[in-house]
Image (cartoon, helix red, strand yellow):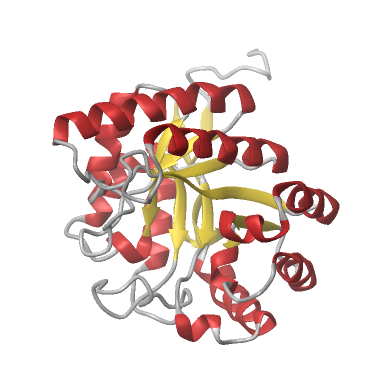
Amino acid sequence: MSDPGKFSAEDDVMLPSLDCDARIVMDYSINQITTCSASFESDIAEWQRAGIPSIGLWRRKVDEVGEQRATELIRESGLNVTSVSFGGGFTGSSGFQFREALSDGYQALFLGAAVGANTVVIAPGSRGRYTERHERRLVVSAIRELAMAADDFGLTLSLLPMHCRLAREWTSLISLECAAEMAGDVGRDNVGIVFDTFQFGRTDNVLLSLERLAPLIDLVQLSDSLNEPSSPYDRLLPGDGNLPLTDFLATLRENGFIGDVDVQVWSDSVWDRPTTEVLTAVRSHVDQLLAVPTRVSELPVSV
């Protein structure tokens, strides 16, 4: 008689197969940029009122109340923090000198650690006056230094690529592949990349890229659109456009994605709406969009 705690060659074992009718809702946060005109204090109260357990912090809002007060409010609220946006600008394109940008990056880490965030978003800066080789060496060295400190705090760094039409002073990374290559150059396990659905949701073979890069993606910035990006403010609330957001999330989950989903909508029309209305609209769409297929049905196989 076989040990009931072990499998024998004659036993049938129930292994999971994909059941498209079985679904599980992924957790998500809403980033403070989605309610750009509201105050930090108002955001905290509205997130709690709407029953949204997680928030993505936008540092400009943090600066309005000060990091100490922001940290106190987050801790008192019980909200989870998925991400802090952002640090970077190492090439001087955002107005910082290199050492100033590095110091600001450390400050972003300190904030992330204080509020218990999972990741800090890094926008490296455009190439600016540097040659490609010099810019690469400068940025990689800065990210590697910050990553070593982030490791001590239990934080990841997520490199931000952007569509070439929108990157400007923000980043020289204009594709998911570029960001993945830079993460590889840094060579630290706690450095990954951001997938922004608005920026790259219409690129060729995006699902194939997501299949390959899913384990490297720490953060999905979720928003919708109707057309190719031409302005940073063309974003729509998830479900109001025609991007295949459910396909993106399902593909990521099936290929090893274990990061966070942060609803991040830059939009003048959204910013003009009351916060309560925006959060209600997000919940009505996103709870359904993020109900992605899970492997739960069982088929017998012999081992």
Residue at 26% x, 48% y is: 126
Q: Quadrant of the N terminus?
A: top right
Residue at 75% x, 64% y is: 44
Q: Classify residue 72 as left or right of residue 103.
A: right
Quarter of the figure with residue 27: bottom right
Residue at 59% x, 73% y is: 35
Question: Observer-nearest residue: 235 or 92?
Answer: 92
Q: Quadrant of the C terminus?
A: top left
Residue 14 shows up from this direction: no
Q: Classify residue 295 as left or right of residue 142.
A: right
Residue at 56% x, 19% y is: 7
Q: Classify residue 220 as left or right of residue 110.
A: left
**Residue at far right of view:** 76
Q: Is residue 140 above or below residue 68?
A: above
Question: Observer-nearest residue: 88 or 292?
Answer: 88
**Residue 235 at what x, y percent from top left?**
39, 75
Q: Is residue 139 above or below residue 189?
A: below
Question: Observer-nearest residue: 151 or 134?
Answer: 134
**Residue 66 at what x, y percent from top left?**
71, 52
**Residue 272 at what x, y percent from top left?**
55, 86
Residue 153 shows up from this direction: yes
**Residue 211 at what x, y percent from top left?**
30, 45
